[in-house]
């Protein structure tokens, strides 16, 4: 097992923070800029509205 860097609780938090920061920088870097509509927030919003539409259609069908 590799040695613990800071502590057992801070290491996972540091890893998640580093990953989120890296993804934020990836999305906002002008050289690697994603096309409009393909950012994570836009994709989550699209998936959420699609799920809501499917759920409402399913509820209307069963009622």
Image: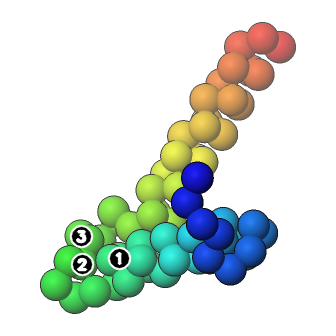
Other-residue count near label 1 (Cα within 10 Å), few / some / many at <14 / 14–19 / ≥20: some
Q: Are marks 3 and 2 in contact (CB under 8 Å)?
A: yes
Residue that mark 2 sits on: 33
At mark 2, the secondary structure is loop
Task: Residue lying at the far left in this picture: please name it.
Answer: 31
**How far apart are the alpha carbons under marks 3 and 1?**
10 Å
Mark 3 vs mark 1: which is more N-terminal? 1
Residue that mark 1 sits on: 27
Whole-percent x and y of residue 5?
62, 76
Other-residue count near label 3 (Cα within 10 Å), few / some / many at <14 / 14–19 / ≥20: few
Mark 2 vs mark 1: which is more N-terminal? 1
Residue at 22% over, 88% down: 30
Whole-percent x and y of residue 12?
66, 66
Whole-percent x and y of residue 3?
60, 66
Q: How is the image coloured?
A: rainbow
Image quarter for residue 36? Answer: bottom left
Q: Which quarter of the image is occupied by the C terminus?
A: top right
29 left or right of 56 in image: left
Residue at 71% over, 13% down: 61
Q: Nearer the viewer, residue 13 or 40?
A: 13
**How far apart are the alpha carbons under marks 3 and 2?**
7 Å
Q: Are marks 2 and 1 in contact (CB under 8 Å)?
A: yes
Q: Marks 3 and 2: which is nearer the front?
A: 2
At mark 1, the secondary structure is helix
Q: Nearer the viewer, residue 28 or 11?
A: 11
Task: Residue lying at the far top in this picture: please name it.
Answer: 62
Q: Is residue 52 above or below residue 36?
A: above
Residue that mark 3 sits on: 35
């Amino acid at each position: 097992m590799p040695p613990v860097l800071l502590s057992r609780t801070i290491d996972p938090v540091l890893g998640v923070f580093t990953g989120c920061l890296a993804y934020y920088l990836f999305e906002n870097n002008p050289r690697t800029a994603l096309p409009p509509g393909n950012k994570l927030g836009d994709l989550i919003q699209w998936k959420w509205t699609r799920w809501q539409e499917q759920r409402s259609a399913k509820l209307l069908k069963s009622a």
